Amino acid sequence: MCVDNFLYEKSVECPVCGNTFTVTAVKKKAYMVESRDTDFCVHYKALNPMLYDVWICQLCGYAALQSSFPNITPKRAKLIQEYITPKWVARETEKIITYEKAVNRFKLALISAQISKAKASEVAAICLRIAWLYRFMNDEEKERTFLSNALEKYLEAYANERFPLENMDEATVIYLIGELHRRLGNNEEAVVWFSKVINSRTGTERIQKLARDQWHLVKDELKKNSVS
Ligand SMILES: [Zn+2]
């Protein structure tokens, strides 16, 4: 199946500099889910829409996930113009985005978020997606690095921000923190966060089930380790 069939172009206005530019967007019919990982990474049957999730303004250099792209505050936009635009070298816009190119685009979004002092939850969402890109590319070491960055930022967001965080309610965020701990081998911490979800009895049925399943998984792991 030709990737081209799933893509179309649309016009976007940059909230930092007012430039109008074209982005490649993914048609709804491409969103065919193959499976979901326990940290919410989605595997798609055909094209991976996540590859197209970062928008970059070639005029001023502002880059962000499309969900947060329009929502930059004037204060943050000023920081982009002050620290990113003067150093920005426009590059060719690509219609077809490979995993390697996507990693670079997400890292540009990460730089924009960090330099303009975006909320921790926004930085966390970018780091988590970079970890997933490395997962798709089978680079475990870099995946771990970015899972760990995502965890650090979700912990910061959990402590300081109001829910929902990027569409996730409190129980979902607590579960995700537990799951990131588990994937990084911090089994004791994972148990604490999964228990928090289970004991709170809040969140969706799906999150409660995930928390119970992962709690059992990590408990078994801890038992195995204490025997050997
Ligand atoms: Zn711009």
Image (tube, rainbow, N blue to C red):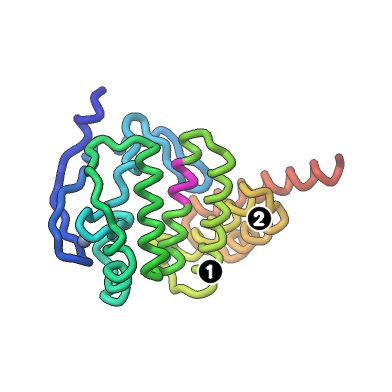
The residue at 46%/36% (across/down) is 136
Residue furthest to the top in view is 1
The residue at 40%/59% (across/down) is 111
* Amino acid under disc 1: Glu
The mark lying in front, picked from 1 and 2, is 1
The reply to whether the C-beta atoms of the residues labelled 1 and 2 are less than 8 Å apart is no
| Secondary structure beneath label 1 | helix
* Mark sitting on residue 156: 1
Lateral position of residue 33 relative to residue 195, left or right: left
CA gap, disc 1 and disc 2: 17 Å
Indicate if the residue with disc 2 has its beta carbon within 8 Å of ligand 1: no
Q: What is the x, y in percent for residue 125?
A: 43, 56
Lateral position of residue 64 relative to residue 2, left or right: right
- Over which residues does the magenta segment extend? 128-133
Q: On the rendered image, what quadrant is the N terminus found in? A: top left
- Establish if 133 lies above or below 81: above
* Mark sitting on residue 190: 2
| Secondary structure beneath label 2 | helix
Whether 222 is among the magenta residues is no
- The mark nearer the N terminus, 1 or 2, is 1
